[in-house]
Image (cartoon, rainbow, N blue to C red):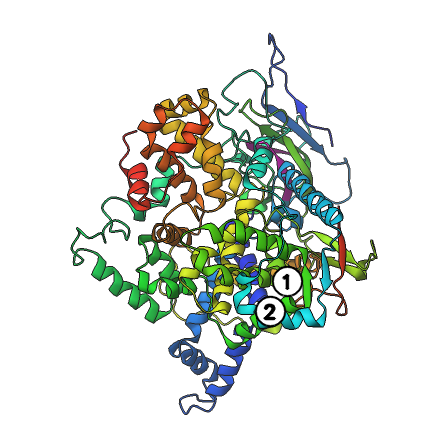
């Protein structure tokens, strides 16, 4: 660990290095040069005058937002002696487990390739390219034969891997002891307890107004809603990322949500961003990837069957196919425990000049992946903006839900947090479910891996994702999962099998997320 | 440097893990230059608390051990993984005693939790003062950092002058880190227009 001063300097140096050469940097330079024509800029006090100009014209705010974004996304810098893999994942056995899991996925994809005799990637013939370009906006009408394709893995396969995760230096004895966890996760990660969560999520307290509770029909809007909307409009006018992130902790008004999320994620949809999206689109047209078929299959199996999301089917293809070709996503592997799969073109195995990543963005989609995009379609209708929002959400949050790491927002920590909360605050329920062979994590795992997308009603889901953005953490998913069990505890105590427990928790579409969270965190008698 | 030695408790019925280990580092005697320790860098492996004692050259007779680091907490909770495999730096400013003319260092490691099978520290490095590589070419804007205009309130924040001095050194470090990272291909994912991939490779 670096002491405070060293860490701060390293962070500053790193952020400057990342912003240098970015489009914001060239825009600032351009603005500074243009400002020289202003009469207020005097040669004697050139530096100060330009700085003042940048402040008043709002460019300093844009720079602040960019710095804030970097601070949020990248973890604190590692010790200089630490190798790069330490920033990805500090614990050696977790890195190893992630490596083995990835190898399994690669083998599965390779065997699918060999069985179906389809290459992983090939150039599309010109006629096919033209055809695809013509029906770009209605790819959903296509009905390719996908019966032979199967998803590379499903969440329950991943759960099996997590259940078998063991620290070789931990006393994993057969005899029951305080060291053996009663749940499915057996690694001793540090998770928060309710007093710590209460402090972290203090804006969700009972005496603070929330959208999702205090904007219901029975509550007059003068009490909270009107003022909250007014503040939201002010935050948008100021274009301040940090203020927006603080604001959305109490929920986003529907009309302002799209702009507030874009502000927090620092997405401005500049002409060069639109151009970049068009470039990705042309990459999709030119090269055909096996991963495309996996995406098609996933969308057809999940989003197309969902009452809320089937209308967005075409958007989902337009986003996910481009996402697979986006090499800028490779940057997130610096702080993710995962590693992008590698291959060699034209069979030139081992020759580095012919080494490529596959898919170009290094992310192999799994069953349910398209559900990360679907809720965003309610907010953004312009494909390039929708794309950028999804990409930023993925490299900030969603990647942690399907890789093995010790990060507090990683899926392993979320699972352990869920099990620990349930065990501590509903011990009778936990014991009962365990006795009947219905370990609670078996039911809640799929909710957390998908960030509850497809399980909650859309308006409730968006209120939940407001808080994910507001707190820059996925821990709220584990808290909500425990709160759902607490809510249905009475029914669950009466079931006698895993299937019956699943049935009690099969339909979450009527749940109201914020009251559940508030009661579980702040109103449960401990 | 002797490997970590566990201290056995006398009269124990079963092979209880004592939870205390000691690493001794002895510097060769009679070295021409006096050994001064300015920084200690190591990688933790499940040690919860660290104390460091130093033995200094001095008047002839039995040498005393002086505590230079007392009970530094490496793992916030000894039973859980946080901090268990982290890298740590101990600077001269954190040390409680003079670190000139050191003849030996003793690292006392404590891990009170019975949950772990082994604990220790790895990749131990000791640096004398002034041994850090000098910063490489620092860009001109860094050396011309203007002092801030009256900042509103620096209560609780580090001194800006000190931070500015540190940034120069850290810049050199980030250059090193950047050189180590593999350069990702920006934009193009194909090689000369070709992206015919047949199988993924392992490892």
On-image quarter of the C terminus of chain A: top left
The residue indicated by pointer 2 is A281
Residue A523 is inside the magenta segment: no
Q: Quadrant of the N terminus of chain A?
A: top right
A59 relative to B23, above or below: below
- On the image, the x and y values in percent for residue A32 come to 49, 82
User: For this view, does A440 lie left or right of residue A290?
Assistant: left
Residue B22 point in image, percent of width and height: 64, 27
Q: Is residue A524 above or below residue B165?
A: above
Residue B41 in magenta stretch:
yes
Residue A49 shows in this picture: yes
Q: Is residue B58 visible?
A: no
Query: Which residue is tagged 1?
Result: A327
Q: Earlier in the sequence, mark 2 or mark 1?
A: 2
On screen, residue A236 versus residue A271, left or right, reads: left
Q: Nearer the viewer, residue A418 or A510?
A: A510
Disc 2 packing (10 Å; few <14; some 14–19; many ≥20): many
Q: Kindly identify which numbered label has been placed on residue B32.
A: none
Identify the subunit bearing mark 1.
A
Assess whether mark 1 and mark 2 are in contact (beta carbons under 8 angstroms).
Answer: no
- Quarter of the rendering containing residue A108: top right
Q: Are marks 2 and 1 on the same chain?
A: yes
Q: Residue at x 60, y 9 (%)?
A: B12
The residues colored magenta run B40-54
Which one is in front, B172 or A60? A60
At label 1, counting other C-alpha atoms closer than 10 Å, the crowd grade (few under 14, some 14-19, many 20 or more) is: many
Q: Compared to A283, does A501 lie above or below?
A: above
Of residues A43 and B91, the one drawn nearer to the viewer in this rendering: A43
Residue A425 placement (x, y as % from top left): 35, 29
Tell me which chain the residue with mark 2 is part of.
A
Q: CA distance from mark 2 to mark 1?
A: 13 Å
Q: Nearer the viewer, residue A82 or A59?
A: A59
């Amino acid at each position: 660990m670096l002491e405070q001063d060293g860490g701060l300097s390293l962070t500053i140096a790193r952020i400057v290095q990342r912003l240098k050469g970015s489009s914001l940097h060239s825009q600032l330079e351009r603005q500074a040069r243009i400002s020289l024509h202003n009469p207020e800029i005097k040669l004697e006090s050139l530096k100060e005058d330009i700085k003042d100009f940048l402040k008043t014209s709002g460019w300093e705010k844009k720079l602040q937002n960019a710095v804030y974004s970097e601070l949020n996304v990248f973890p604190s810098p590692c010790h200089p002696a630490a190798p790069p893999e330490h920033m990805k994942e500090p614990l050696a056995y977790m890195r190893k487990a992630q490596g083995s899991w990835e190898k399994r996925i690669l083998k599965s994809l390779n065997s699918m390739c060999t069985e179906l005799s389809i290459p992983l990637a090939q150039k599309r013939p010109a006629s096919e390219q033209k055809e695809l370009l013509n029906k770009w906006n209605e790819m959903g009408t296509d009905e390719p034969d996908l019966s032979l394709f199967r998803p590379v893995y499903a969440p329950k396969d991943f759960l099996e891997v997590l259940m078998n995760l063991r620290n070789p230096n931990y006393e994993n004895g057969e005899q029951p002891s305080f060291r053996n966890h009663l749940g499915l996760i057996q690694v001793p990660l540090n998770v928060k307890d309710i007093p710590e969560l209460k402090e972290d999520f203090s804006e969700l307290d009972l005496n603070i107004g929330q959208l999702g509770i205090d904007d219901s029909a029975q509550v007059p809007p003068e009490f909270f809603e009107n003022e909250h909307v007014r503040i939201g409009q002010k935050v948008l006018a100021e274009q301040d990322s940090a203020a927006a992130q603080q604001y959305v902790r109490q929920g986003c008004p529907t009309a302002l949500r799209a702009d507030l999320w874009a502000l927090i994620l620092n997405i401005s949809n500049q002409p060069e961003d639109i151009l970049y999206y068009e470039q990705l689109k042309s990459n999709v047209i030119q090269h055909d990837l096996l991963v495309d078929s996996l995406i098609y299959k996933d969308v057809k199996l999940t989003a197309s069957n969902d009452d809320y999301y089937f209308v967005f089917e075409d958007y989902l293809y337009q986003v996910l196919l481009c996402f697979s070709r986006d090499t800028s996503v490779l940057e997130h592997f610096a702080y993710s425990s995962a590693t992008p799969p590698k291959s060699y073109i034209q069979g030139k195995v081992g020759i580095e000049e012919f080494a490529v990543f596959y898919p170009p963005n290094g992310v192999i989609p799994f069953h349910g992946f398209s559900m990360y995009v679907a809720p965003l379609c309610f907010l953004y209708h312009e494909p390039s903006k929708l794309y950028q929002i999804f990409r930023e959400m993925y490299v900030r949050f969603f990647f942690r839900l399907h890789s093995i790491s010790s990060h507090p927002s990683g899926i392993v920590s979320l699972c352990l947090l869920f099990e620990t909360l349930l065990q501590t605050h509903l011990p009778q329920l936990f014991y009962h479910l365990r006795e009947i062979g219905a370990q609670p994590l078996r039911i809640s795992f799929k909710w957390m891996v998908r960030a509850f997308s497809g399980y909650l009603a859309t308006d409730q889901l968006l209120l939940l994702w407001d808080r994910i953005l507001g707190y820059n953490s996925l821990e709220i998913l584990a808290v909500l999962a425990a709160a759902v069990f607490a809510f249905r505890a009475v029914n669950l105590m009466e079931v006698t099998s895993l299937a019956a427990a699943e049935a009690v928790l099969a339909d979450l579409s009527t749940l109201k997320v914020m009251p559940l969270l508030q009661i579980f965190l702040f109103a449960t008698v401990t | 440097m002797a490997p970590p030695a566990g201290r056995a408790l006398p009269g124990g019925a079963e092979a209880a893990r004592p939870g205390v280990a000691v690493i001794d580092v002895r510097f060769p005697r009679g070295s021409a230059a006096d050994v001064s320790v300015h920084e200690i860098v190591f990688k933790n492996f499940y040690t919860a608390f660290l104390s460091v004692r130093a033995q200094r050259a001095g008047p002839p007779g039995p040498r005393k051990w002086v505590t230079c680091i007392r009970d530094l907490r490496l793992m916030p909770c000894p039973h859980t993984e946080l901090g268990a495999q982290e890298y740590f730096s101990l600077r001269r400013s954190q040390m409680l005693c003079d670190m000139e003319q050191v003849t030996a260092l003793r690292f006392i490691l404590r891990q009170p939790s019975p949950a772990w099978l082994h604990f220790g520290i790895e990749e131990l490095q000791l640096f004398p003062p002034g041994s850090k590589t000098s910063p490489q070419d620092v860009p001109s804007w860094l050396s011309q950092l203007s002092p801030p205009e009256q900042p509103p309130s620096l209560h609780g924040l580090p001194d800006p002058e000190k931070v500015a001095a540190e940034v120069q050194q850290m810049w050199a470090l980030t250059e090193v880190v950047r050189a180590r990272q593999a350069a990702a291909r920006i934009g193009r994912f194909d090689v000369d227009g070709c992206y015919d991939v047949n199988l993924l490779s392992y490892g």
